[in-house]
Amino acid sequence: MNQNEIILRDFELYLNYNLPSIEGFHPHFQKALREILQAGGKRFRPMLLLSIVDICSPLLVKNSYPVALGLEMLHTYSLIHDDLPAMDDANLRRGHPTLHVTYDEVTAILAGDALNTDAFYKISTAPLSAQIRIELVKILAQNGGSGGMVIGQAIDCEFEDKILSQNQLEFLHFNKTAKLIAASLLMGAVICELDEKSKTAIFNFGLNLGLLFQIQDDIIDATQSSQEAGKPTKNDGNKNSFVNLLGLDDALRYKKKALEALHMELKKLDKKLADRLNVIVKGYFNG
């Protein structure tokens, strides 16, 4: 078991021990919140954050678990809302029925709302200095809100069935996907109080990583079954995906170029940090 796997194992234990506990007499709201968090997933964003901390300030890893959980909660809210009938109308997520299928649309909407706001509570009460906590909240709000993920999703929904240029498609996915991944890395750097040059390099690496993540997701949608992917696939026919815009062969070539660009960004980072992140890149993208 490598260090990234150990981090994921320990984070999963922390997550399961700190699942939402709701007061009241609602028949299934707490169950819905818990099951969507326990449904698995890559835990990609928490792993990025915790890997930075593990390399740069290992004594702060445990203090960073609430931040990583807040990050995963915000990401999970975005998936719940993305799957709603008003958006993707998906019936499968992480190999499990989506919340609006298992329960109802109201439960799904409110579960997403709860995870969105509870995410910031987790971060604001983490055992870190007040200055760092404020900066973490700021980064997540900037990149997860209207300046990042939300505007990306809005553009994605607005321009279904309409062809975007490659530059527009990249803008969409830099916002919808890449900024939250870059924020995950930057939040780890903030916890470790790295210098501004390092934080900028780490964020830029994250943007490239996030774009690659989206290209990979588009290729998976085009080439894997729903069972293999753990979510509905062959479902992007009317969406602005890299496969739809470029074709599968050119999308695979685009992925190769994105990997090369990512390795160039790695060279700008501290060697120990670059080596750890390179393990993640190889594990997820066979690169």
Image (cartoon, helix red, strand yellow):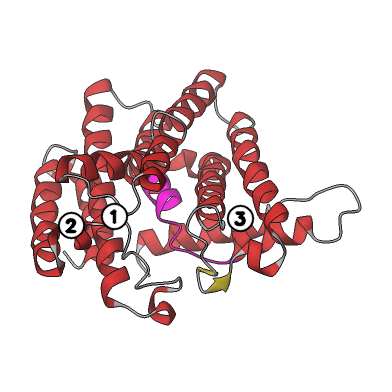
Q: Position of residue 25 (x, y in %)?
A: 91, 53
Res. 15 mark: 3
On screen, residue 242 above or below 55: below
Q: Position of residue 26 (x, y in %)?
A: 86, 54
Lower position in the chain sequence, tag 2 or tag 1: 1
Type of amino acid at the residue the image marks with label 1: Gln
Counting other residues with Cα less than 10 Å from the Cα at mark 1, is it few (<14), some (14-19), or many (20 or more)?
many
Question: How many discs appear?
Answer: 3
Q: Position of residue 44 (x, y in %)?
A: 40, 55
> Which of the two discs, 2 and 1, sits closer to the camera?
2
Tell me: 24 left or right of 213. Answer: right
Near-viewer residue (219 or 142)? 219
- The answer to whether any part of residue 54 appears in the image is no
Residue at position x 16%, y 44% in the image: 165
Residue at position x 26%, y 36% in the image: 202
Which element type, helix, strand or loop, lies under badge 2? helix
Q: Which residues are magenta?
A: 39-50
**Can you name the residue that lies furthest to the front here?**
161
Res. 225 mark: none
Residue at position x 13%, y 59% in the image: 246
Quadrant (top left/top right/bottom left/bottom right) for the N terminus = bottom left
Type of amino acid at the residue the image marks with label 3: Leu
Per the image, the residue denoted by label 2 is 245
**Can you name the residue that lies furthest to the right here?**
25
